[in-house]
Image (tube, grey):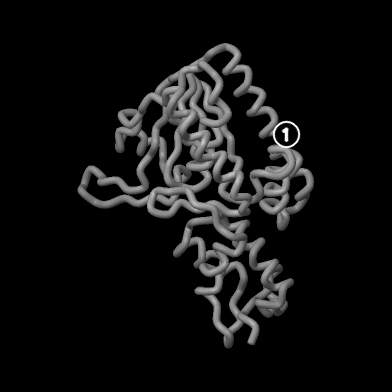
Amino acid sequence: MIDIVFNGRFASTLTEYDKLRQVNRQVLALPMYLGLGDISQGTFIENRQTVYKIQYAHQENSEYHTAQAVQNLRNALKLLDEAIARNEPLRAWWSDDVNDYCGFLWLCNYLKNSTVEMSSIKVPMTFVTSDNALAIISGLGDLTPENIDEFNLFDLEKSVSKNRRTAYSYYWRDLRSENNPIRAVINGKCISQSIDFYDRFILLNLSYERFRKIIRVIGETIGNYPFAPEWWYRHRIDYLVSKGSLEYKIDPDMMVGKIRIRH
């Protein structure tokens, strides 16, 4: 059995869970961010490389980190292909987080002609804790190893038949044919969106009058609207500044400046 996850942090969580319980099981991480970027033009690796470039654009040695992410993806896909060739059972972990959702659809499409046994665990975004409190997560990366047993996640495992894989592969095909750069999960459905879909959440934290530090704007946007990663919001701020929709001012006390909506 190989566990397939689409969130790097949850891959570490699941690996730690197995280690604590002395379970010898491989966890295969595929953090492909399929909710973002093109999914129809060029090769799959080229499309993901473009997204990785955005992810690491503001980090030192960004070209190295981008190349490393691409190589990690190539290695993971090779391991997946080898597991399929061995006919090893696969179990996918996913949720209504858009990158999980699209990752699961992609995997069903990838396996649509395979006879390999597949199951999935779709993790809900809300839980009732042992003290009757409501726990809400924004993605699988929020879970701890202890949460896996606390919320009885393995009880949610279901078989994914070849017919179900085919049905989900049609869903993925439709998303690709729509050729939009953003996907979002709305009311349990994955829907294509325009490139500026998440910009509204940035603008809600800005005004025409006061300049605000970019770091604080991103932090509040993530805190209130955790629908896209931090680096995507930063990328869109860069674009809105270059377009002239936002006004930028250097902050002498910070490496990152301040912004406001341009009059």
Corner quadrant of residue 83: top right
Say which element carries label 1.
helix
Picture quadrant where residue 79 is located? top right
Q: Residues within 10 Å of mark 1 (few under 14, many from 20)?
A: some
Query: Does residue 234 appear left or right of residue 252 in this picture?
Result: left
Q: Residue at x 35, y 38 (%)?
A: 147
Residue 13 screen position, x and y as percent: 47, 36
Residue at the disc numbered 1: 71
Nearer to the camera, 253 or 242 = 242
Image x and y of residue 89, in percent = 48, 18
Q: x, y (%) of residue 87?
A: 54, 13
Instruction: Pick whichever, 116 or 20, lies toward us.
Output: 116
Left or right of 166, for residue 63:
right
Q: Please determine whether, in this image, residue 48 is positioned above or below residue 152.
A: below
Above or below, 176 relative to 160: below
Q: Nearer the viewer, residue 154 or 146?
A: 154
Q: Residue furthest top?
A: 86
Q: Nearer the viewer, residue 164 or 159?
A: 164
Residue at horizontal 78%, vertical 43%? 64
Q: Is residue 65 left or right of residue 236?
A: right
Residue drawn at point x = 42 percent, y = 26 percent:
160
Q: Is residue 248 above or below residue 195?
A: below
User: As shown in the figure, which amino acid type bears the numbered disc 1?
Assistant: Gln
Residue depicted at 62% across the width and 80% down the height: 260
Report which quarter residue 23 is drawn in: top left
Q: Quadrant of the C terminus?
A: bottom right
